[in-house]
Amino acid sequence: MAAAAVAEAASEPPQQHQFPLPAVLEYPASTPPYLITQGAEGRLYKSTYLQPDIPCALKYRPPKPWRHPILDQRLTKHRILSEAKVLAKCRRDGLRVPAMYAMDEAAGWMMLEWVHGAPVRVRVNERLGDRKEGIDKDEGLKELMRRIGLAVGKMHKIGIVHGDLTTSNMILSPSAESVTDGQLDGTPGSLEGEIVIIDLGLASYSTTDEDRAVDLYVLERAFTSTHPRAESIFDELLKGYKEAYKQSNLALKRLEDVRMRGRKRSMLG
Amino acid sequence: MALETVTLDHLPASQTVHIAYFRNVRNAAFLHSQLLARNPEFEYGFVDASVIVSRLHLLSAVFRAATTASTNSLITPNVHSEIIVSLSPSNNISEAYRRYGISPSTKDLLVVKISGPDGLSHDDIAKHLSQHVEGDQLPVTDENIAPATDNSKVAKYYKLNGLSWLDAIKDQPKKRKEVETLVVGTLAVRGI
Ligand SMILES: Nc1ncnc2c1ncn2[C@@H]1O[C@H](COP(=O)(O)OP(=O)(O)O)[C@@H](O)[C@H]1O
Ligand SMILES: [Mg+2]
């Protein structure tokens, strides 16, 4: 029975799969799984949830042959449960993250809402183009930075820290109203849309200003190394952060300490 | 005949899912008693439609139950009872039966039957249901489910009260969609 299902799924390969698929992806689907990224910990496929018109992201953490099997299983389970809990909490508290559709933590997978759009990194780089000057006067870009800050501030306010904030772990998702002629992912260079925070695999519940400050510091470092020419507008992001999160002054104060520690460390290193 | 056979993505091809919907059910007490007597002919997922917000809500529970069956990790006697627990945010089985399953006072009923490779055919099931369920059969659509939904019960069971951002949504279809998303998310993380 399983073999028949495998044969059926494999009869029209849309993509040569280099890696073994989780069992759930071997079963027939209207849109066969398509590998989007292969990270250190897991793989991300695009597929469909239940029916052809509901695209989904399937995150799969395959067994790591170099780890002890029982420990590996336990770790995988723990990571999936932790990400799922955080996603569910964010969503209940009204923060825009991918919705949870289904999961099997023992088998190592979770299915999430597919968020249309492009990573913020991509849209920012398109907008910057090869400009060297006038970036700090780009009102559209500065406004995007404030929107990113709003999203991060809202996340911290509800008691979640992300653990890996980068412009790759945010999607700029065009609003339904703005989508014309089926361009669900938006158009290159456009900064219209909603900021959706993704990849909460390292996120946790925390309400300490230290953790929040570290989260912001990681984002600042990631931002300035990914978009060095836009370094001068990072402050706009912090403006949005303050707006969304009224008690942010302590976290921002702490951010200065964290920066200092960072600087000392790099001087020593 | 309004028994619908649905193909759900990522389920073993050997499992066939059939769904039906009856409004104004007149013999819920009889159907309920058949479940209690464990009459194998009445092995169905009998869902009280008042706690269901949409077709996707129902199908999400079906998907979870079928996936659980395919990995041999059912926490109830069979895949049909598993559908009922799969509708619940908690692992409390008797509470799930009480809240989401048929009761003698059920008015609107969603029915699910999952048949294996050598199980009953669509026509067998359709015939059995039309013989034994006294009610007005309708297609399983969001439009048909909506009038049967008891929103205050849904809010209570799925802990949606006090979410100010949700209460602030005035556009009803949009709000329904958000409720559906929250409910589906709640089913996905049941028991953790
Ligand atoms: N829910 C989603 N919707 C759309 N694209 C997604 C979604 N989740 C992830 N992606 C895409 O896949 C990439 C990798 O996913 P991510 O969750 O960040 O995993 P990793 O841990 O490998 O970084 C993201 O940068 C994004 O482009
Ligand atoms: Mg990532």
Image (cartoon, coloured by chain):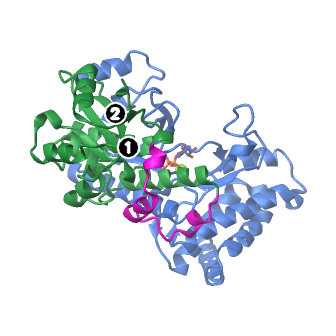
Chain colours: A blue, B green
In primary-sequence order, the first of circles 1 and 2 is 2
Q: Quadrant of the N terminus of chain A?
A: top left
Residue A88 in which image quadrant: bottom left
Quadrant in which residue A109 is drawn:
top left
Check if mark 1's residue and mark 2's residue have beta carbons within 8 Å. yes
Asked if residue A239 is among those painted magenta in the image, a careful observer would answer no
State the residue at coordinates (70%, 34%).
Answer: A183
Which residues lie in the magenta part? B145-170
- Name the residue at 48% across, 23% down: A15
- Left or right, B57 with reference to B94: right
| Residue with the most extreme top position | A11
| Residue B85 sits above or below residue A49 on the image | below
| Quadrant location of the C terminus of chain A in the rendered image | bottom right
Q: Is residue A60 above or below residue A72?
A: above
Residue B168 vs residue B74, the one in the foreground: B168
Residue A49 x %, y %: 44, 37
Residue A169 appears in the rendering: no
Q: Nearer the viewer, residue A107 or A85?
A: A85
Residue A133 at x, y percent in the picture: 90, 55
At 80% across and 61% down in the image, what residue appears?
Answer: A142
Q: What amino acid is at disc 2?
A: Ile
Q: Nearer the viewer, residue B124 or A70?
A: B124
Circle 2 chain: B
Q: Decide if residue A3 is in sight here.
A: yes
Vertical relation: A91 (above or below) A260: above
Q: Is mark 1 within 8 Å of ligand 1?
A: no
- The label on residue B19 is 2
Q: With B7 as the anchor, is A228 left or right in this view? A: right
Amino acid at pointer 1: Leu
The disc placed on residue B58 is 1
Q: Is residue A101 above or below residue B130?
A: below
Residue A163 at what x, y percent from top left? 51, 64
